[in-house]
Image (spheres, rainbow, N blue to C red):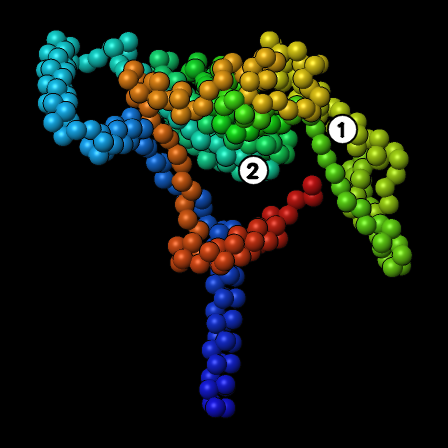
Amino acid sequence: MEFLIEYASFLLKMVTVALIVVLTFAGIFASKSKEKAGDLKVTKLNENYETTKELLETELIDKKQLKLQHKEKKKQDKLSAKADKKAKKQNSQKTEDECKKRLFVLDFDGDIQASATQALRREITAVLSVATQKDEVVVRLESGGGVVHGYGLAASQLQRIKDANLPLTICVDKVAASGGYMMACVADKIIAAPFAILGSIGVVAQIPNIHRLLDKSLVDVELHTAGKYKRTLTMIGENTDEGREKFKQDLEDTHVLFKEFVSSARPVIDIDAIATGDVWYGSQALKNNLIDQVSTSDAYLVSHFDSADVVSIRYQAPKKLAEKLGFSVLSALEEKTSKWVSKLSQYKGY
């Protein structure tokens, strides 16, 4: 029995040591190695739609009727192929006007940090490399907002599409508020579901402060800065009225920039009336000119299946070492370790 206990203790120690070694090397490797390219997944939504349609027809339609439909479809396909072959003989290269329109569909699911921007920028770069002015970019956007600089960059990425003279449509099925709406208003056309939430054109910030608790515990906190407004409010130091006023002024300045951005992108909006931080549902947002059409993204895409090639573009980041090994918990620890090592090796005083 003692042998088993000692053996189990030995195994536990070995596992602990192995985890520490793996985490250490994973962190160092992640911080020092060059960024690897991910994969770009391209899905033709038209084909998925046709496959689903055919499956349902097989199950629901009478076999004789289905056989007649398939016969008619083969006939139409044969005629279409013959016409295409004839057209190729007459002109081996199609002009841009003769090419079928393409809808490039991108998805943005935003968190507080707007982390999806990293994938969005790669997807947009890929689309711009092949798209023509006859094509259209559709972004299915879902976000309740987040940090100013994160969503500012995300909106700037969408602006690249506009600068390339490509039509940009934003579809909102659930929510595009605050930073999410900041992104949406860049589009030529905003489409939202009837109960999607839009708006929240405002700025918010909150900072917990435990100074009084530390003061009761006889804990002193020293904060030294070079620059009068390097720190206005802190979590552990004693905040001043002057610092609070400067902090509030910074929020007001940010709000002014937000309002100017929205007003410039959508001049039809009465910015003073809607920039209160309030939100509206899709049908209400239409009345306030926050959107251009009430519909779901599914309905919009399906309406283009007959006239255009609808293609989903999605960038998938390369897997981390721990994810390749199949350890989800280890993956999270690896990410934390990587950030810690990166801060130690690339510390900047900001």
Q: Which residue is mark 1?
A: 250
Whether residue 324 is visible here, answered yes or no, is yes
Name the residue located 81 percent from the left edge and 37 percent from the top edge. 232
Q: Which residue is mark 2?
A: 111
Task: State if disc 2 and disc 1 touch (CB < 8 Å).
Answer: no
For label 1, the SS is helix
Instruction: Tell me the amino acid under the disc marked 2.
Output: Asp
Q: Position of residue 23 (x, y in %)?
A: 51, 61
161 lies left or right of 85: right
- Looking at the image, the residue that sits furthest to the front is 62
Name the residue located 62 percent from the left edge and 27 percent from the top edge. 178
**Residue 284: quadrant of the picture:** top right
For label 2, the SS is loop
Q: Position of residue 171 (x, y in %)?
A: 47, 23
Q: Closer to us: mark 1 or mark 2?
A: 2
Whether residue 149 is visible here, answered yes or no, is no
**Quadrant location of the C terminus in the rendered image:** top right
Instruction: Tell me the amino acid under the disc marked 1.
Output: Asp
67 lies left or right of 331: left
